[in-house]
Image: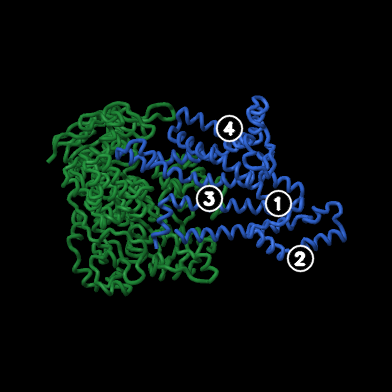
Amino acid sequence: MLRIFIHRLLLGIATVAIVSGIIFAAVEALPGDACTAILQRDASGERLANCRRELGLDRPAVTRYVEWASGAVRGDLGISAHNNKPIASLVGDRLKNTLLLAGCSLALGIPLALFLGVLTGLRRDRFSDLALSTIAIFAMTIPEFVTATVLIFVFSIWLSWVPGIVTASASSPLSAFFPGIVLPVIVLTMVMTAHIMRTVRSSVIDVMSSDYVQMATLKGVPYRQIVFRHALPNALLPAINVIALTVGWLLGGVVVVEKVFNYPGLGHYMIDSISDRDLPVVQAIALIIATAYVGVNLAADLLAMAFNPRLRTLKARSP
Amino acid sequence: MTGDVLIDVQNLSIGFTGRSGKLLPVLRNIDLGVRRGESVGIVGESGSGKSTLALAMMGYLKHGLRVISGQSLFGGRDLLAMPSRDLQRIRGGKIALIPQNSGQSLSPNLRVGAQLTESLALHGKVTSSGIPQRVTELLQQVRLPDPAAIAIRYPHELSGGQQQRVAIAMALAGDPEALLLDEPTTGLDVTTQAHILELLSDIAVRLNKAMVYVSHDLGAIARVCSRVVVMYAGEIVLDGDATTVLTNPDHPYARGLLASIPRLGNPNLPMALEGRPPPPGDAGPGCSFVDRCAIAEASCRSERPGLQPLLAGGRVRCRLHERAGSIPTKRAGKPASAGGSFGEPLVRLSNLAISYARQSLVDQLLGRKPQGVPTVDRVDIEIRQGEVIGLVGESGSGKSTILKAVAGLVGPANGEIAYDKSGALPATVEQRRPEQLREIQLIFQNPDESLNPRHTIEQILAQPLQLYFGLSGDALRERSIAILERVRLGAHYLDRLPSQLSGGEKQRVAIARAFAAKPKLVLCDEVTSALDVSVQAAVLDLLDQLRRDSGTTYVFVSHDLAVVRALSDRVAVLYQGRLCEIGPAAAVYSRPCHPYTEALLGAVLEPDPGARPVLMAEDIMELSPPAKGCPFQRRCHRKVEAICESMTPPQQDAGAGHIIHCHIPIGELTSVQTMSALDNVVRPHVQ
């Protein structure tokens, strides 16, 4: 088990390293650099050369990559070209806000999705299943900005229950985001719940028609015990991977939702940085998103292994 | 010995609603009583309704099924109309099921001990403090070694035989009055199967329980049951004592079924029972077997026969049963087209080794060879033109792996495969010439998986014809029809999809596809294992006919020794990827020399009430072959100790190309055999 963990961890680190190289190379291949962004129209001749010398941009790409990468490992992501502040603190604020948004959505969405998935799976083809499954398909297919617009219209303009946009600045304390965060959380919850719920539903249906559930029934095991002891531990395993994908998606910046609600998170910041041509920031955010994806998937695989005796013992006991 | 009626099914009909909205019956008017202490076998082919009947005896209907009429009584109460709380008490407590595939019937997330504990807690005739003790006793009772170690394992950590034993222990946990066994040994290796049946018949006798044993395998039924019920198209067609039903039954279907079973002592092909049972709802007003019956009259078509009592005891659903005796049960069909003389060698496997061990990334970078013992090793077989060579062995014996290597799907790790006059075959299909690809064709076990479900039969057959012969248009169609007719299917099959055909028809299409390429060598991988016996006999007959017509060479892989016997000229016995014995079929079967062959043949179950399998080798699970010495050393009942563990057994020639890989001197091997075993296998069939 420990060996597998170390093996997977090393693979994850290698993946992030390769991705960081690709990000650096891609940004490098773009026309313009931090100095052209800082100097804007003055970016020519002597001034440009001076700026590049000052920022060390005249050195070979490999040297700069090594410097950037080693800085990133230490938590130093460089200086924003837009306002000359350290990127670590700029991005740090946004990351914290995104984590808040993701955390709230997950805390609401995962239990709801698991509950609805199990319910619809167990009540397959009955009215409650058909109704909930249909709603889920709607929630999945309607784009987030449509849902967001409708919710803003109803709850903030029409009923005036909650604010329609977030007015807090990026560096405000977390408490400042309430109650503005409510609508974005609801939109995100709707989308993710539908995805997870459908996976759980089909997995519950599979497991409930499996030979071992039939066997448990014929052994005289009461229904409740069949569900909680024989079916769910097996049926919920596939949910782990879908949840991991969802978490990655939430951390990777839910660009549209953050933009619509003016929420100062990572996705919003990335869009702004792209339009400002603030390449060091874009580079840093891309790296963070990639790391989050790899980390979450690693965690999901290890969790799946821990909960599935088949995966766990196969590796550990066979020679 | 037998007591009051415990299970009593009365006029039970069960059906499902078809796509047309009509109610289609899968069980029709079943009347069956089982007494305490009685063991009843229910036999029938797939779709006969036998499993549905067994589950109905526990008050369980699969999704979509419902009761049309009748009752399923247990101890006088109808299980099909009982509140679930009462059902829970009866299921597992009074009547317990031993399922077909225990690997899938044990919950994968719970340890074996926990699952047994659950049964004991539910139907506990023991106090909670006595449960661990009882778990151990149960595991001992089903003869599992080291119960403490087994109890803390998960189901997937056990072998198929061990899983089946755990399932039996679980059924015994509630101390039920009746046991239902739903194909409990199907899918297990022959030696394991023989051990499990031995255990079951011992339990039946010792614990005096009512037993219902559902199986398509008459050999297994013969071993365990004293009374046999034959089902056909959802009806009981015959009910009688085992000896009569298995040797001289009064129903034409039962007689046809017996004749279609290949037998070890009989080198001839079994008799095919042509046609197939009517699908649910399609049986006409008359007898459901009428289309396949050899003695049917016009009146059989119009009037449904009742289940009438026989003078000698038992019941039969046939109006002409007095004449059924004229249908032969043992007269096997024509002998397989054997012959002593074959052509030039076509394929020669020399010192073949195949390894599935994959090189890890690190090994590749360092240029290291993969480690571990190869799956197949030191295999030397020469196959001559026009010959049928059978490869037999239990799962893990490497027989399918060898086929894949010849087909070019896996590359050999060592040795070579010489083909025809062109020398060594390139390792994989990518490197082979189109001509070689055409000449070597492979037929798979399961046509459901080997035929593309979205292609019509025409498209399936067109592929080899276009690829190898560049046919198109009318020529293509003509050839397709000609090939279909060769496999005894007509032109009207061309625009059908595989899902519209029966299992036997699908396998015929797969055979047709292989023969469309005009192959020289056809590799058959368990081609009849997924089929019912009567269909199997027809497919064997077809393969033999095709070979007779075109002189094709077959490599025929099967775990079923009797099937191999029926078709093969020579047989190679494999264990753990190593050759044990190879020789003419007649010699290997009548005088098995290698201890493994002896054990295998001894364990085969023949559909004769008198035959008892002889258990020699332990049914332990071997994950990988031993690094050195004889592959069979760990299970051998005639082991000569040290030398078997250290030295590769020598090849000994018993004459006429019969070669045995064993340390025991040839004279001793042939003379001092476990005679009882041989006696048993051969005696009932010597004619």
Q: Which mark is residue A59?
A: 2
Work out which residue is located at the far left of the displayed protein and give it. B1
Q: Is residue A186 above or below residue B104?
A: above
Pointer 4 residue: A138
Pointer 1: what residue? A282
Q: CA distance from mark 2 to mark 3?
A: 61 Å
Q: Is residue A245 above or below residue A76?
A: above
Are labels 1 and 3 on one chain?
A: no
Closer to the chain start, of discs 2 and 4, is 2
Q: CA distance from mark 1 to mark 2?
A: 21 Å
Colour of chain A in the image? blue
C-beta proximity under 8 Å, tags 2 and 3:
no
Q: Earlier in the sequence, mark 1 or mark 2?
A: 2
Nearest the camera: B487 or B414? B414
Q: Quadrant of residue A229?
A: top left
Residue ID at (42%, 26%) = B21
* Protein chain holding label 3: B
Residue B530, image x, y percentages: 37, 48
* Residue type at numbered disc 3: Gln
In the rendered image, which quarter is residue A190 located in?
top right
Label 4 marks a residue whose chain is A
